[in-house]
Image (cartoon, coloured by chain):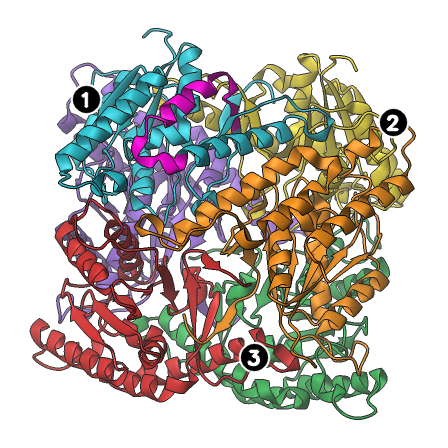
Chain colours: A red, B orange, C cyan, D yellow, E purple, F green
Amino acid sequence: MTDQKSALVVSAHSADFVWRCGGAIALHQKQGYDVTVVCLSYGERGESAKLWKQDGMTLERVKTERRIEAETAAAALHVHDIQFFDLGDYPLELTRDDKYKLVDVIRAVQPDFMLSHSKIDPYNTDHAYATQVALECRMIAQAWGHNPGQKVLGAPQLYLFEPHQTEQMAWKPDTFLDITPVWDQKRAAIECMRGQEHLWEYYTRVAQQRANHFKRNSGGQSGGRDCKYAEGFQSVFPRTIDTL
Amino acid sequence: MTDQKSALVVSAHSADFVWRCGGAIALHQKQGYDVTVVCLSYGERGESAKLWKQDGMTLERVKTERRIEAETAAAALHVHDIQFFDLGDYPLELTRDDKYKLVDVIRAVQPDFMLSHSKIDPYNTDHAYATQVALECRMIAQAWGHNPGQKVLGAPQLYLFEPHQTEQMAWKPDTFLDITPVWDQKRAAIECMRGQEHLWEYYTRVAQQRANHFKRNSGGQSGGRDCKYAEGFQSVFPRTIDTL
Amino acid sequence: MTDQKSALVVSAHSADFVWRCGGAIALHQKQGYDVTVVCLSYGERGESAKLWKQDGMTLERVKTERRIEAETAAAALHVHDIQFFDLGDYPLELTRDDKYKLVDVIRAVQPDFMLSHSKIDPYNTDHAYATQVALECRMIAQAWGHNPGQKVLGAPQLYLFEPHQTEQMAWKPDTFLDITPVWDQKRAAIECMRGQEHLWEYYTRVAQQRANHFKRNSGGQSGGRDCKYAEGFQSVFPRTIDTL
Amino acid sequence: MTDQKSALVVSAHSADFVWRCGGAIALHQKQGYDVTVVCLSYGERGESAKLWKQDGMTLERVKTERRIEAETAAAALHVHDIQFFDLGDYPLELTRDDKYKLVDVIRAVQPDFMLSHSKIDPYNTDHAYATQVALECRMIAQAWGHNPGQKVLGAPQLYLFEPHQTEQMAWKPDTFLDITPVWDQKRAAIECMRGQEHLWEYYTRVAQQRANHFKRNSGGQSGGRDCKYAEGFQSVFPRTIDTL
Amino acid sequence: MTDQKSALVVSAHSADFVWRCGGAIALHQKQGYDVTVVCLSYGERGESAKLWKQDGMTLERVKTERRIEAETAAAALHVHDIQFFDLGDYPLELTRDDKYKLVDVIRAVQPDFMLSHSKIDPYNTDHAYATQVALECRMIAQAWGHNPGQKVLGAPQLYLFEPHQTEQMAWKPDTFLDITPVWDQKRAAIECMRGQEHLWEYYTRVAQQRANHFKRNSGGQSGGRDCKYAEGFQSVFPRTIDTL
Amino acid sequence: MTDQKSALVVSAHSADFVWRCGGAIALHQKQGYDVTVVCLSYGERGESAKLWKQDGMTLERVKTERRIEAETAAAALHVHDIQFFDLGDYPLELTRDDKYKLVDVIRAVQPDFMLSHSKIDPYNTDHAYATQVALECRMIAQAWGHNPGQKVLGAPQLYLFEPHQTEQMAWKPDTFLDITPVWDQKRAAIECMRGQEHLWEYYTRVAQQRANHFKRNSGGQSGGRDCKYAEGFQSVFPRTIDTL
């Protein structure tokens, strides 16, 4: 019931939010938003190869390491709140109760916008599943008959953040966000991902390429606003505006 | 080199701008934009059935009638400038010189955004052709080697306004604009189209349906900003922003 | 084993069949078809906002109200049979037994054609799910090894009726049905939906717009059969015919 | 102004109408339609390899041979009228006057439906171009201001007949036509194509496969109407009907 | 850890692998690959109409007959290993444990490439489901945290084999494989399918049509390698190569 | 009539071949192919902003500079032959004679594969036009009746090289080529583009990102062949092979 702006990230595995929308998180925190991150799993089985190559590794240790990494990265991004649902990965599966728990978070946050994965990902079925769940829970959160008396959800935009190998995922960005002011924070968060060091430079280059696209679309050869780092997003829903 | 905001509409036939973006025109004029409309043809052959059913009608008379209608409608919308290229319709065709003339207008206007037709229209090949020309001329206007010394164009958005039978045109709106404050002007402009009276109510209903969609996407059942009339648009290029 | 023509509507929530294919139902009943409607849920949680805003409302009361509304509307349309599966909504989920129950209905009805929702709906995952179930159960009903001895299903068309915000659902109508002769019945059925009065005029306008499209595609400016109200449908399967 | 039913085929090269819709032509002639075929070119350069391998072949001789083949095939199909525009192939190009000549034919025929190529063909740009021209000329034929006083065209369906390698052309049939009653005529017409004997069996198999699809979609395992030969078509425009 | 080449086929029902990739299987066996086939179900309910028409048929007898047919066909193709998961059909459903069993097979085989169904099939939801499962299990097999210590999977291509009515399944082949050298084996395997004799000639014609496409794409009119029988496949993932 | 392997690049503007397929060119030259590059224009008007910002610049001087740059880059890549058609840009347009000139080159080269732009490019209509021309001229080059007596073209693959902002161009790579062995040459060629220095690092990063994708698709976390620089391509036509 306040005017506090807020946003919600639904991340299939605990590192996704860093690579894919760490800039958006830090930037909106800086602008006064409260950004909540939900990690549906730790990516403990499928996205922790480096840890598993260590002798005597156990599932619990992997999860602990991944949680620490994610919390450290979240701190670097000044995340308002991070929640770990610990639902398991490869494959990720939610029961109806798991979904209701996510609905509870959505209603508590009342996000101005949500962020999740691309709709298609033949390499990683957890990603597309997380987005499907995000849409389903957004719908439930809008239902007046779900936990009557609670404040129902409005109609927040769902932005799909950038997947790996965008073209294979049929992901088309319609929005480029200038994250130059918070790049240092995103890079710091990226460097918390000690198990995936091979991706640090990769995602730095992604941000540089998207900055080029930002410039192209804000002026091209005749100028264009400068931008050193950017993130791209695809909108699921139409915008409602007063000026084109 | 001034801060005057401006927009440019590229209309295949002289009535298209009224039905499809009359609200956007009036609204932006009201907000201080200078909106220029280019009518590539009068739609004199293909979109003037009622006139042709009159005895002794000639091509010149049809064109004159259509021009008067368009000018009257433009006045109702407070259009800053309307230009008639008189290039013929059914089919519409532009020579290289015709395109350069449109480039001249684009450069003179330096639009913050452009408006044109859907990319596909199996019913009306002039429409898709006009959009193809708009993109081509936008590109030429950006070329430093075209009329060197002139101010080159930046990277304005091209919005595709709503076609008739949207689903057959593969047109998907990503933007709804609230035109309630200027609806009376749009309706007045629509009523200038005396030869197409059967469409007055049709396009009034379009605006009402889009208002429903505006509300759905700005809040849904839990509220949503009120809106009585709206227009929908599809963006060709990504947006570049600082806040999601 | 008779020549009685029949049709089957699979409706995710109890009001969907009214807005989306009430005309088709009434028209085919008038032509001698037996039309059966299956409401998988009452839409009691997600599509009954107005009821939930009343003090002391309970789930059972909402379901009762919704059932009465749907039955009254069905009567206005002269529906042959309406069945309520009461499977819950937001989200709708069917077990294997629930699916078999739907298969039983399909086999009993032996429909000449089926009707259900669009394949995609990011706003409402129940809708796309219902269509997926309709296709799955159509397949099971065709299996000779399912309840051997029962009459297996042939290959009825599945028509997808019109969703809200068609362009966002990637729904493209390939068929317009003239429902002018039964419009009064559809309007009466619509007015049974007392909880969604804000949609009465909306869906009346939908029918008027589709009538315009009917005329366009049956003759255009050179005539075209008159039509005041129509409904649009998208076919899933090819037609098999003797004359183009 | 009569009730005579009619159809028009727009064929890029002089043999296309035989392989792709010979059955539809013969069937509708049998049903009392007058079917007119327009061959925009003879396919003399690009689709006459066998002739060009003969010593001393000339362009004129190829055209003569191709015309004789087409006329003989047309006779086998009982084509009402066949016209050769002789516009050249590889590439096919139409001037505005060429298009107006096609418009004249369309208006004279007043077809109940039209037939042409797939919209996409990366192997053969003439094919997609012919369809684009067919749509453009259909539009011009509907224009009251084109040759005022002539009877304008209504809104005939445009069916896209089956291309070679359908999946590469993004061609999806929505209509299967049973051509069993006229198969002997189609086979006879096919055998008139002496320069392309390697395709006789190929297109016979196409008809057999489409018959299987006809059966699948008219009843499947539970029956399905028998059909030995069929042709597939994709509709460009929606249908307008009174019964689903 | 050897250099033995291998491939894995994931077949929803026990006959699918014969019609759709029997040639690829026999050819690669001949080239020294070990090809494993997993039949997720026998297709006992939905794809055994002929058996069910016999008096006194039982589910167990159908499964036995189908298994014998599949084993005989596999022998004709020299399949290295065929496994029957017996998970039921119409609808096919896999639990998490069933998926892990498939993952076990994938890891044991370490396939150089995998084969499964088209991604879409409105006629048969088991098919698309099998492909979704194949992608999901491929992902799990790549996870270092799944059964740590086992050899994880690399990144094998997943080829989608040819469905019935390709255009309705949005299946687009990007690869044609010449199976002429093993055609006799495929035909022999096809003839093992005694319950579906109506499809023998159908799939022989499919192979002949694909051979025509093979020739078209390997040289066209100017030559093209001869090929009498071929199979088509759609690749899910990009290729990685050293020469275009 | 020799066994000399060859390839042909159709480049809309004189620098496109460097950024987009410089690696493929150098690599195939190294493997013994003769690679011919056709620059349809110099990009003198639209892609030479830096030159036009110099005082007293003329169209001829820009063209000369651009030609020198392209020739120097071609030398760095060991291009076999580079031809400048000098047809003008922004917009690029080819007459029938211009097309025949390109057909002459195609027939002289008899390429094993061709390379050109993406099919769609809303930013730059010259690019899509060049690809359309490449397909059209490929077709003409296959026609036995075009310059009878010349050797006709077979059926070479057309690869679409990587555009700027791939997702906006609906470009989806299906092939990644390891260009690590020739990266130094590509970088040297890139540095010849003195007027577009802002793109040197951009396209170096593109090659690094594509190398990551190469690795992902050749083994992923379980290994994957090392690769430091790669290029991506989309195939227009199916492949014809003997082993999957």
D200 left or right of F168 in image = right
The image quadrant that residue A64 belongs to is: bottom left
Residue C194 is a magenta residue:
yes
Q: Main secondary structure of the magenta part?
A: helix
Rate crowding at label 1 as few (under 14), some (14 to 19) or many (20 or more) other CA atoms within 10 Å: some
- In the displayed structure, would residue F136 be above or below residue C5? below
Q: In this view of the protein, which residue sits in the foreground, E10 or C78?
A: C78
- In the displayed structure, would residue D46 be above or below residue F210? above
SS category of the residue bearing label 2: loop
Residue D132: x and y, percent?
71, 44
Residue E5 is a magenta residue:
no
Between the C-alphas of marks 1 and 2, the distance is 66 Å
Rate crowding at label 2 as few (under 14), some (14 to 19) or many (20 or more) other CA atoms within 10 Å: few
* Quadrant including the C terminus of chain E: bottom right
Amino acid type assigned to the residue bearing label 3 in the image: Gly
Residue under label 2: D149
Q: Residue F23: give its label.
A: 3
E48 left or right of B69 in image = left
Between the C-alphas of marks 3 and 1, the distance is 62 Å
Q: At x 20% / y 74%, what residue is drawn?
A: A81
Residues at marks 2 and 3, common chain? Answer: no
SS category of the residue bearing label 1: loop
Q: At x 31% / y 49%, what residue is drawn?
A: E131
SS category of the residue bearing label 3: helix
Residue under label 1: C147
D184 left or right of D12 in image = left
Magenta residues (range): C176-199
Question: Tag 2, which chain?
Answer: D
Nearer the observer, disc 2 or disc 3?
2
Amino acid type assigned to the residue bearing label 2 in the image: Gly
Question: Tag 3, which chain?
Answer: F
